């Protein structure tokens, strides 16, 4: 039986990434766990005074940074994934009209010069034939080769980066990736797109990206490559934290982002992907799973409700029960490190918002909202409270919360 509270809750897609699709820069590239512009705006309205400095320690696609900059606030963001740091910094820059018009002209010229060649380079993605039809792959590879003659590879040239963001969008639009689940899956059929269709699609995407860059941002957002568990030696003074860390639900950001990351050369092999996933909180892909077997916690004072949940998961009958118990334990041990090490960069009175989901393993609920609240309290934060935001999907009991706290 569903509780009355749950029956009244809705899935509220206006509080998910779906809301951002048609909102200019926010819609450039999708990441399923991105949260909604609307939610961030509501929190800023509630928690930020004029001149507040905003922090998002788990930037993802930099929704927080972009919304803050659109509303005239300055912000700092961290992420452990270099592709997302690159994307976020490009997304939150201002561009001059001259630079944008020149870029458009240069790209159109470059695209007209693309000749269909045998693929010179294709990314070393496992089972690439599952992603793109051979003929589509040939066009994409020829286009990439031509673009890389004219434009610097993804890096610090923000104007050139727009070309690579358009190309990233192109590879997804022409792939068999399907986004009708909570994470990415594959469509049944591979489609072979014609050369001209792909060229026109690319131009259309670039036009869309360039026109969204014509709106100037009045605040600034800087995204840094940083592990949010280790924030030592940072010169920062934060008024408001607005963030959505990974959830303890075994979702892998690297798995979801790998087509972009391989094509943009942020990933070169499966081993790099595994190492990056293991370094992320909640990482669960490739060798991350076997690394868990030898993992030891850094803290022995986490909330008792966590230890109880881990024990129950461990004692369930599934063959992976011990591993899943360790997975959940490590997730909260990592979050504890983050929340503890965050303090030196918070101003007194800083307000914190952590958007987080609960999860369930073999029917045993991991009450992330409760565990996180207790971590905040045990670390001396004040006014800890939980707002329920929405029901995540049809699976009973899976909700999303805003865990709020104040740094005294
Ligand atoms: C749920 S996503 C954030 C989504 C974001 N709110 C958005 O709108 O796109 C969580 C992010 O945390 C990052 N992350 C995981 N572990 C991290 C760590 N130790 N330090 C910094 N970032 C980390 C992941 O790479 C991922 O981008």
Image: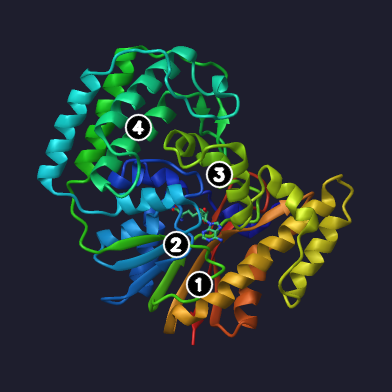
Residue identified by numbered label 3: 254
Q: Quadrant of residue 399?
A: bottom right
Among the two numbered marks 4 and 3 on one chain, the one whose residue lies closer to the N terminus: 4
Q: How far apart are the alpha carbons under marks 4 and 3?
A: 19 Å
Among the two numbered marks 1 and 3 on one chain, the one whose residue lies closer to the N terminus: 1
Residue identified by numbered label 4: 167
Where in the figure is residue 117, as x and y percent of width and height?
37, 13
Where in the figure is residue 164, as x and y percent of width and height?
33, 37
Q: How far apart are the alpha carbons under marks 2 and 4?
A: 24 Å
Residue identified by numbered label 2: 78
In the rendered structure, are the residues bearing label 1 and label 2 in contact, judged by CB atoms less than 8 Å apart? yes
Among the two numbered marks 1 and 4 on one chain, the one whose residue lies closer to the N terminus: 4
The numbered dot on residue 231 is 1
Among the two numbered marks 1 and 2 on one chain, the one whose residue lies closer to the N terminus: 2
Numbered disc total:
4
Q: Is mark 2 within 8 Å of ligand 1?
A: yes
Give the secondary structure at mark 2: strand
Disc 3 crowd rating (10 Å Cα; few below 14, some 14-19, many 20+) is: many
Residue drawn at (34%, 46%), measured in percent from left and top? 155
User: Is 118 in front, or is 107?
Assistant: 118
Give the secondary structure at mark 1: loop
Give the secondary structure at mark 4: helix
Q: Quadrant of residue 104?
A: top left
Disc 1 crowd rating (10 Å Cα; few below 14, some 14-19, many 20+) is: many
Residue drawn at (34%, 25%), measured in percent from left and top? 145
Where in the figure is residue 1, as x and y percent of width and height?
74, 51
Q: Is mark 3 within 8 Å of ligand 1?
A: no
User: Is 41 in front, or is 299?
Assistant: 299
Q: How far apart are the alpha carbons under marks 1 and 3?
A: 23 Å
Residue drawn at (39%, 22%), measured in percent from left and top? 140
């Amino acid at each position: 039986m569903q509780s009355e509270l749950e029956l009244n809750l809705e899935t509220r897609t206006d509080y998910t990434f779906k809301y951002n699709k048609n909102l200019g820069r926010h819609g450039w590239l999708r990441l399923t766990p991105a949260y909604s512009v609307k939610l961030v705006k509501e929190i800023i309205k509630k928690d930020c005074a004029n001149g507040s400095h905003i922090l998002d320690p788990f930037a993802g696609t930099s929704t927080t940074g972009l919304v803050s900059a659109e509303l005239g606030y300055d912000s700092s963001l961290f992420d452990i994934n270099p592709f997302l740091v690159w994307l976020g910094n490009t997304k939150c820059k201002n561009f001059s009209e001259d630079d944008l018009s020149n870029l458009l002209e240069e790209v159109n010229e470059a695209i007209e010069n693309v000749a269909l060649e045998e693929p010179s380079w294709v990314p070393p993605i496992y089972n690439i034939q599952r992603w793109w039809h051979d003929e589509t792959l040939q066009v994409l590879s020829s286009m990439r080769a031509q673009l890389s003659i004219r434009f610097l590879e993804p890096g610090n040239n923000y104007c050139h980066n727009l070309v690579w963001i358009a190309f990233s969008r192109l590879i997804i639009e022409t792939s068999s990736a399907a986004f009708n689940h909570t994470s990415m899956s594959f469509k049944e059929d591979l489609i072979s797109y014609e050369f001209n269709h792909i060229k026109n699609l690319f131009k259309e995407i670039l036009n869309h990206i360039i026109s969204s860059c014509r709106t100037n941002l009045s605040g600034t957002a800087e995204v840094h490559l940083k592990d949010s568990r280790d924030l030592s030696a940072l010169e920062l003074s934060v008024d408001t934290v607005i963030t959505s860390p990974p959830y303890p639900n075994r979702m892998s950001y690297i798995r979801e982002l790998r087509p972009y990351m391989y094509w943009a050369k942020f990933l070169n092999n499966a081993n790099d992907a595994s190492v990056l996933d293991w370094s992320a909180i909640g990482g669960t892909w490739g060798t991350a799973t076997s690394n868990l077997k030898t993992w030891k916690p850094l803290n022995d004072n986490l909330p008792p409700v966590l230890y109880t949940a881990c024990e129950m998961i461990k004692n369930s009958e599934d063959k992976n029960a011990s591993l899943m118990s360790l997975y959940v334990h490590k997730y909260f041990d990592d979050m504890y490190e983050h929340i503890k090490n965050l303090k030196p960069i918070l101003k007194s009175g800083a307000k914190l918002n952590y958007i987080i989901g609960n999860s369930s393993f073999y029917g045993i609920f991991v009450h992330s909202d409760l565990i996180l609240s207790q971590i905040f309290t045990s670390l001396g934060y004040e006014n800890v409270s939980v707002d329920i935001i929405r029901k995540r999907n049809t699976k009973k009991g899976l909700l999303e919360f805003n865990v709020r706290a104040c740094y005294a």
